[in-house]
Amino acid sequence: MQKVKKIGVLSLAKILGLLYTIFGLIVGALFAVLPLFGFNADETGLFFGAASIIIFPMLYGIMGFIGGAITAFFYNMVAKRIGGLEVELTK
């Protein structure tokens, strides 16, 4: 077993930002197609449904980036005191 002693704050922030952006795109697409099935099918529902394809990925991406940076920062503080995460690697 090897231990992960430190995680790059910017590295984890970028990865989680991208993963959350992809997730936000999926959620935004679902919100975009809901008016087609009668959920809030008035004009505002159609507009906000289409706008959600842009809004959700942006918001999710930003929050994923910030959350990743905070998580890596606190992980590094905790791992310094109690040891890192144990990972088994193969060659």
Image: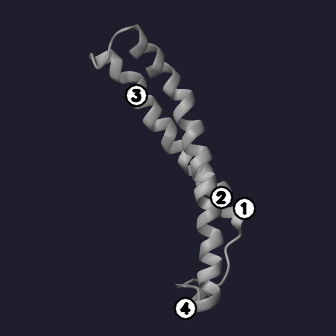
The percent coordinates of residue 40 (x first, y second) are 31, 17
The three-letter code of the residue at mark 4 reads Met
- Asked if the residue at tag 1 contacts the one at tag 2, i.e. Cβ–Cβ closer than 8 Å, the answer is yes
Mark 4 and 2 residues: CB-CB less than 8 Å, in contact? no
The reply to whether dot 1 and dot 4 touch (C-beta < 8 Å) is no
Q: Quadrant of the N terminus?
A: bottom right
Q: How many marks?
A: 4
Of labels 3 and 4, earlier in sequence is 4
Q: CA distance from mark 4 to mark 2?
A: 26 Å
At x 65%, y 58%, the residue is 13
Does 15 appear above or below 52? below
| Residue beneath disc 3 | 31
The amino acid type of the residue labelled 1 equals: Leu
Question: Which of the 4 image quarters holds residue 58?
Answer: top right
Q: Report helix, strand or loop for mark 2.
A: helix
Question: Tag 4's secondary structure?
Answer: loop
Which comes sooner in the sequence, label 1 or label 4?
4
**In which quadrant of the rendered view does residue 54 lie?**
top right
How far apart, in angstroms, are the residues tagged by discs 3 and 2? Answer: 26 Å
- How far apart marks 3 and 1 lie (CA) works out to 31 Å
